[in-house]
Image (cartoon, grey):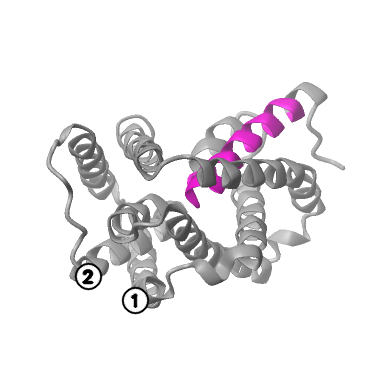
Amino acid sequence: MPFELLSLEMAICFSTLLFAYLVFGMAGFGSALIATPVLAMYLPLNMIVPILALIDLTAAVLNLFKDGKNADYQEIKWIIPLMIVGSLVGAAILLKTRPDILVLLLGLFVVGYVLHAFFSKKSKLPFSKALVVPFSLVGGVFSALFGSGGFIYAMYLSSRIEDKQRFRLTQMTLIGFSTLTRVVIFLVMGVYLNLDILLIALAFSPAMLIGTWVGRHITLKISRESFLKFINVIILLSGIALLYRYFFVL
């Protein structure tokens, strides 16, 4: 194919995706957060986004085909319409202005929230159902702006859903829906007519299959407390990535 990765570069990318989808298999989100910075050293961003969208969608569909009946559709039915509204708002913001201050404020909020969760000794009460509105809207906004809103839904759902497997599948369903939207857009725009994108996505698919399988089995074996700590670490990394984007990229 015209765009070729050397064997060493391929090995690095494959190993990164293996870990990224191990995290995805455990948490139901986070693959792009881990994979994009490494892949960006070897592939252009306009290839990375549609490649990861295609692999994310495949991962979500495969997992939901197996265990999808265990997702919490009572939560999903409220989140998805609000996610769509938020995505439209995010698209409008992207067209009208630079979203710098939003990145800073959300980054500070996410880091503060997770640090409080780590160090607070009080037992946490579940979030009120009413909070589905701000979390879903903000998740949609940031999905449209940066293709990354999964950690925002995770903050809400980790407080609402006790069972770690149910949380994982609910989160994965939301990511699958969000990613499907992007894949359809890329398809309509003709992005997937680029054979390189399809071939690289196919080459990386075994890393996704192995990673998600291992991640799922780890989740089944660890305690809820350990699982929540893991989720909070991924959310914290997302907040730090937002702050990095604000101070060094935007």
Image coordinates of residue 170 in percent, x first then y, are: 46, 63
Question: Is residue 22 covered in magenta?
Answer: yes
Chain-order first, disc 1 or disc 2: 1
For mark 2, what is the residue? 129
Q: Is residue 29 visible?
A: no
Mark 2 neighbour density, 10 Å: few (under 14) some (14–19) many (20 or more): few
What's the amino acid at mark 2?
Answer: Lys
Image coordinates of residue 9 in percent, x first then y, are: 73, 25
- Secondary structure under tag 2 reads helix
Residue that appears at 76% across and 43% down: 206
As drawn, the label of residue 78 is: 1
Q: Which of the two residues, 214 or 22, is positioned nearer the viewer here?
A: 214
- Quadrant housing residue 84: bottom left
Give the mark count: 2
Residue that appears at 40% across and 57% down: 163
Q: Which of the two residues, 190 or 81, is positioned nearer the viewer here?
A: 81
Image coordinates of residue 241 in percent, x first then y, are: 38, 36
Q: Are marks 1 and 2 in contact (CB under 8 Å)?
A: yes
Q: Which residues are magenta?
A: 10-32
Is 244 rendered above or below residue 202? Answer: above
Is 208 rendered above or below residue 143? Answer: above
